[in-house]
Image: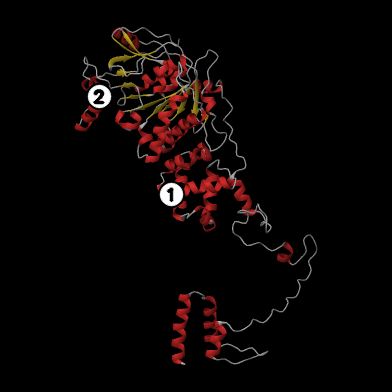
């Protein structure tokens, strides 16, 4: 039987997380500096020890210490003695470092097509109309076999659709130039935040996040998020994409004796801030259903109220660190957080939340029957790995020995929408009747052959250009001739009449204007002229 996971201790009783119920999800909440990172480290290493792979974002760099064994110190020894806790068996956990920017870990990428228009619209901060246009762009690309892999593919596709909006209108609907422009501006902003490095190939294989080492311990995947956090939409959308990939990739397995993977979403409020309703519905659906795939999701944030009620109701395992109540609004938040726990008659939860020391927490895990246990106040155990960040040299050594070392470092740029559309822009126009002529000429008129342009046969010496053939004389009877007849004019040369400047002007205007409004204007002009005449 899989052993329970000791996370904290209350008096002489350990507060343990049951492995078979880890996939019921959970949250770790508390104010800054109250010990959330250490709690996250303890939980991740406990899961790794029983063979469960973990993915987490490291927003401060402290979680990199999981890759090195911990050691005792006078301050730590004093804490263990004061609380009556045993010293842990110091050991490092198997880790893999990832980084969207490719600096502090293996590069992690996704393709534009795989991200999809919904999450991409969230990243670009598009409104409903602009999102609809983006979906049309994806649809046009799919219908014509154009791969959208990186940002230059999407930019080329946007430009092409914008230039040919009138041609696509009857089949796909109206495509607003303003919406195309808004998407392009959003894409530029994302590229400046590092999106051009994130989108591309080779795309991250989810199986590479679900590795175990030679000892059967689960690999802890640590995403360097200190720089990524400066682009909150890119950060939150990336983690949501990973969660969706897990959901779509993994088969249904039901309840297992331990989860297949656990996903920790740090700074979770970034996921829900200003999220549109369709995205919130997608998050709720994924959280609700991914449990049956054997995946546990844990949100890490300052206050449980940062998480929507529909999602919060799915989180059965909870660890609450201290909250500060300096204002009436803070006091209401503390009271609301206390009400999310199963009450303990021996504990005033609301008061305890404001009194918790660093490293102390209120804990409520699911029992063996899936019920939330009564909240208990306890001290989080000391992790067996190093508390605090590792050095750059240690990080490089761990990256070199990683199971995925060298797999993602070299970017691939294969033929996709950008290459095909730009190739069409410089290619010869398609032959009439060619089925593969879609978009080939980009709306340009066919160019003359080299002989016609240069006056010489291809590959030969120059020959005199043929003399121009006489053109047939235009037939009369048009509106311009009628006006000419009204205004009068003499003939000259070959029986043709020479037009006065006034006649020439009016004929030109009459031939160029064919609308009803134009004809009415001409009538008005002629009326004035005839009266004067």
User: In the image, residue 127 lies at what x, y percent?
Assistant: 40, 47
Tell which residue pokes out farthest to the left in this image.
328
Q: CA distance from mark 2 to mark 1?
A: 41 Å
Residue 307 visible to an observer of this rendering? no
The residue positioned 48% from the left and 46% from the top of the image is 135
Q: Could you say where residue 422 lies in the image, as x and y percent from the top left?
A: 60, 50
Q: Position of residue 40 (x, y in %)?
A: 38, 21
State the residue position of label 2: 338
What residue appears at the point 45 percent right and 75 percent down from the top-left corner?
517
**Numbered disc total:** 2
Q: Do we see residue 529 in this rendering?
A: yes
Residue 257's tag is none
Residue extending farthest to the right is: 461
Q: How is the image coloured?
A: secondary structure
Give the quarter of the image for residue 410.
top right
In the image, residue 393 lies at what x, y percent?
50, 22
Work out whether residue 338 or residue 247 is closer to the camera in this orientation and state it: 247
| Lower position in the chain sequence, tag 2 or tag 1 | 1
Above or below, comparing residue 267 to residue 145 in the picture: above
Please, what secondary structure does the residue beneath circle 2 have?
Answer: helix
Q: Residues within 10 Å of mark 1 (few under 14, many from 20)?
A: many
Image height of 428 relative to 331, above or below: below
Picture quadrant where residue 437 is located:
bottom right
Q: Nearer the viewer, residue 300 or 521?
A: 521
> Residue at horizontal 40%, vertical 34%?
283
Within-10-Å neighbours for mark 2: few <14, some 14–19, many 20+ = many
Q: Is residue 512 above or below residue 99?
A: below
Q: Residue at x 35, y 25 (%)?
A: 315
| As drawn, 268 above or below 78 | below
Q: Which image quarter is the N terminus in?
A: top left
According to the picture, the residue beneath numbered tag 1 turns out to be 130
């Amino acid at each position: 039987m899989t052993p329970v996971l000791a996370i904290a201790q209350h008096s002489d009783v350990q507060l343990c997380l049951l492995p078979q119920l880890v996939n019921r999800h959970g949250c770790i909440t508390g104010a800054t500096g109250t010990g959330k990172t250490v709690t996250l480290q303890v939980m991740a290493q406990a899961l790794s020890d029983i063979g469960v792979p973990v993915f987490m974002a490291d927003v401060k760099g402290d979680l990199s210490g999981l890759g090195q064994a911990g050691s005792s110190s006078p301050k730590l020894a004093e804490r263990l003695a004061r609380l009556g806790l045993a010293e842990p068996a110091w050991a490092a956990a198997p880790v893999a470092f990832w980084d969207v920017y490719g600096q502090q870990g293996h590069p992690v990428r996704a393709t534009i097509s795989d991200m999809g228009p919904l999450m991409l619209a969230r990243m670009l901060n598009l409104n409903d109309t602009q999102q609809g246009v983006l979906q049309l762009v994806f649809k046009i690309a799919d219908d014509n076999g154009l791969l959208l892999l990186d940002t230059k593919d999407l930019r080329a596709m946007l430009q092409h659709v914008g230039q040919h909006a009138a041609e696509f209108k009857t089949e796909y609907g109206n495509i607003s130039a303003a919406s195309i422009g808004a998407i392009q501006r959003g894409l530029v902003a994302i590229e400046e935040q590092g999106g051009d490095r994130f989108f591309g190939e080779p795309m991250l294989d989810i199986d590479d996040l679900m590795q175990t080492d030679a000892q059967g311990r689960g690999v802890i995947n640590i995403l360097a998020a200190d720089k990524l956090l400066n682009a909150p939409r890119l950060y939150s959308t990336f983690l949501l994409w990973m969660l969706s990939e897990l959901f779509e990739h993994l088969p249904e397995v039901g309840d297992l004796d331990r989860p297949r993977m656990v996903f920790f979403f740090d700074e979770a409020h970034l996921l829900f801030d200003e999220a549109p309703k369709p995205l919130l519905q997608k998050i709720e659906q994924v959280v609700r259903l991914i449990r049956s795939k054997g995946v546990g999701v844990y949100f890490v944030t300052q206050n449980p109220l940062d998480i929507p009620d529909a999602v919060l109701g799915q989180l059965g395992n909870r660890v609450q660190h201290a909250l500060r109540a300096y204002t009436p609004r803070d006091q209401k938040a503390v009271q609301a957080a206390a009400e999310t726990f199963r009450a303990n008659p021996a504990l005033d939860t609301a008061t305890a939340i404001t009194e918790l020391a660093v490293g102390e927490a209120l804990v409520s895990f699911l029992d063996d029957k899936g019920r939330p246990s009564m909240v208990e106040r306890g001290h989080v155990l000391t992790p067996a790995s190093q508390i605090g960040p590792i050095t750059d040299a240690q990080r490089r050594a761990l990256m070199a020995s990683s199971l995925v070392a060298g797999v993602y470092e070299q970017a691939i740029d294969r033929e996709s929408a950008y290459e095909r559309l730009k190739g069409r822009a410089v290619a010869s126009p398609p032959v009439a009747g060619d089925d593969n002529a879609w978009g080939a000429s980009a709306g340009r008129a066919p160019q003359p052959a080299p002989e016609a342009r240069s006056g010489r046969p291809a590959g030969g010496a120059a020959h005199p250009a043929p003399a121009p053939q006489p053109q047939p004389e235009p037939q009369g009877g048009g509106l311009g001739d009628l006006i000419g007849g009204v205004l009068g004019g003499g003939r000259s040369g070959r029986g043709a009449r020479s037009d006065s400047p006034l006649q020439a002007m009016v004929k030109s205007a009459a031939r160029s204007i064919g609308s009803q409004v134009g004809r009415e204007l001409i009538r008005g002009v002629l009326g004035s002229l005839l009266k004067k005449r």
